[in-house]
Amino acid sequence: MPHILAIAGSPSHPSRTYSLVEYASKILVQQGFTVDIISVRDIPAEDLAFGRYDSPALEKPKAILAKADGVIIATPIYKAAYTGVLKAFLDLLPQKALAGKVIVPLATGGTIAHLLATEYALKPVLSELGARHILSTIYSVDKQIQVQPDGSIQLDAEIAQRLQDVLHDLVKAINTSSATKEVAHAG
């Protein structure tokens, strides 16, 4: 069964970013994927701040990442960049941790002015970690994600459709990759 790791890079909880990750995860589970969510805010701050590569708290996230076929990386955008807590986490991953994985960047922000922050700030780091198959980024402005009284979210129709499209592309890319691997092992 294909496996997805969703990394929520928000320093706060609850957050629109985390809710967007949950929303996307539910869609993927309905399509037969196994999805794990890691919230980087749950990793000890000392480990992140002091760059403790050998922290026991990183063993499980690294193991989940190693078996993942695809990775969703979600972050709020603050001051035209992704969060520092996400950067600290990414810095502690092995050099080519994203090699061979299909990546979907998700970002949320208060204004459309930071739309390109993932292109100029996040994607170069993902590439440095070995990501070669990065799908289209979904950037949503806060007003496009309405938090409901029960804690769930209601997405603006445009964002909902764009998210559906990129998740479709993720599923297709993973299934194609899996089929290619099976043919290579059979031959």
Image (spheres, grey):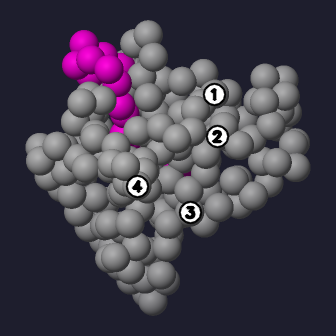
Q: Earlier in the sequence, mark 4 or mark 2?
A: 2
Q: Residue at x 71, y 43 (%)?
A: 42
Contact, mark 3 vs mark 4 (Cβ under 8 Å): no
Determine which residue is flagged by label 1. Answer: 85
Where does residue 171 sit, x and y in percent of width and height?
Answer: 31, 67
Nearest to the eye among marks 4 and 2: give it. Answer: 4
Q: Amino acid at mark 2?
A: Val
Disc ID at residue 36: 3
Q: Secondary structure at mark 4?
A: loop
Q: Secondary structure at mark 1?
A: helix
- Left-right relation of 178 to 143: right
Determine which residue is flagged by label 2. Answer: 40
Where does residue 86 sit, x and y in percent of width and height?
Answer: 59, 31
Determine which residue is flagged by label 4. Answer: 150
* Highlighted magenta segment, given as a residue range: 98-117
Q: Residue at x 58, y 32 (%)?
A: 12
Q: Nearer the viewer, residue 178 or 48?
A: 48
Q: Secondary structure at mark 3?
A: strand
Residue at the top extreme? 79
Q: Earlier in the sequence, mark 3 or mark 1?
A: 3
Q: Earlier in the sequence, mark 3 or mark 4?
A: 3
Q: Amino acid at mark 4?
A: Asp
